[in-house]
Image: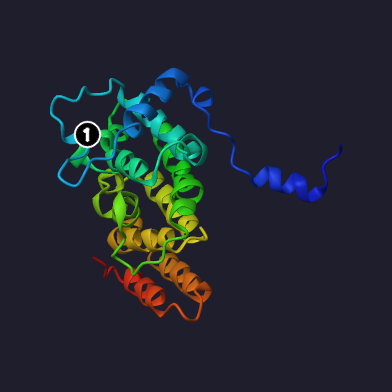
Amino acid sequence: MKQTAREKRLARQAPSPLTPESIGLDATLYADAVRYLFDRPVPGKKEREWYWDLDEPYFEATPLQWTHIQTALFANAGTDLTAYSDEQVGMGLNCVMSTNAGDIPLQVLDPSVPLADAVRMLQAFPRLWSDCIGPRRAPVHEAIGSSSGRLGFVCYMWFDVWPTFWNARHIPEWRDAMWQVFCQMLDVPCRDVQVAALHGIGHEGHALLRPRELQERVEQFIRSVPAHDEELRNYARAAAQGMVQ
């Protein structure tokens, strides 16, 4: 059947599939990494997460492989993590975002990783929020800063603890890609994801070196916020001034 003009336009706009094979990553290694990060029991009240165990074997992968693993994970989390609970997803993503749980977020900054591969990883990042975190957090209604559970913590605190962009903020390609990440996250129809983007803008927006564009983008977002959500509008105004915690 012949495609209509609209179908052709949507096809051009749709993100290209990012499978492990399409980015040169062994599919078995990727599957093993997903199990390593997410196929973990949720600890009880007096227990700690698995990554605090000093005897836990470290997952063997090169910095480039870890970069590709994250690229595939970000792009496909909406489907590849469906078997795991919110708490398991939160634990695994905490390993990806925080050096408290290892050095995964710093692997992409290794000199052995080509800039193009690093930027591709960052370009896939918004899909983690739109396809995985957003749908999981959409039913939740909590005050800003009071997110509960491990996934709620990851969602709200990502840009507070993620060292990756801050350590690459001097690279123009990273700044451009990070700007697009925030813009796309603000478009995700999930309040928690929008708050996460604003939280990131509040902490790192000045490093993007786009003060006028940033202010205009936040003002555009504020105009889209429902009239009853004064808390979100105020938070957006504070984020644009770098005044968030």
Residue at the spot 28% in from the left edge and 68% down from the top edge: 242
Q: Amino acid at mark 1?
A: Trp
User: What is the x, y in percent for residue 45?
Assistant: 19, 47
Image height of 72 relative to 85, above or below: above
Q: Residue furthest right?
A: 1
**Residue 154 visible in image:** yes
Q: Quadrant of residue 194?
A: bottom left
Circle 1: element type: helix
Q: Write down the residue under mark 1.
A: 50
User: What is the x, y in percent for residue 121?
Assistant: 42, 37
User: What is the x, y in percent for residue 156?
Assistant: 32, 57
Q: Front-most of 176 and 8?
A: 8
Residue at the spot 81% in from the left edge and 49% down from the top edge: 5
100 to the left or right of 71: left
Q: Front-most of 215 and 199?
A: 199
User: What is the x, y in percent for residue 19?
Assistant: 53, 29
Q: Quadrant of residue 211?
A: bottom left
* Quadrant (top left, top right, bottom left, bottom right) of the C terminus: bottom left
Number of numbered discs present? 1
Image height of 176 relative to 215, above or below: above
Residue at the spot 29% in from the left edge and 65% down from the top edge: 145
Q: Residue furthest left?
A: 54
**Residue 114 visible in image:** no
Image height of 7 relative to 229, above or below: above
Q: Residues within 10 Å of mark 1 (few under 14, many from 20)?
A: some
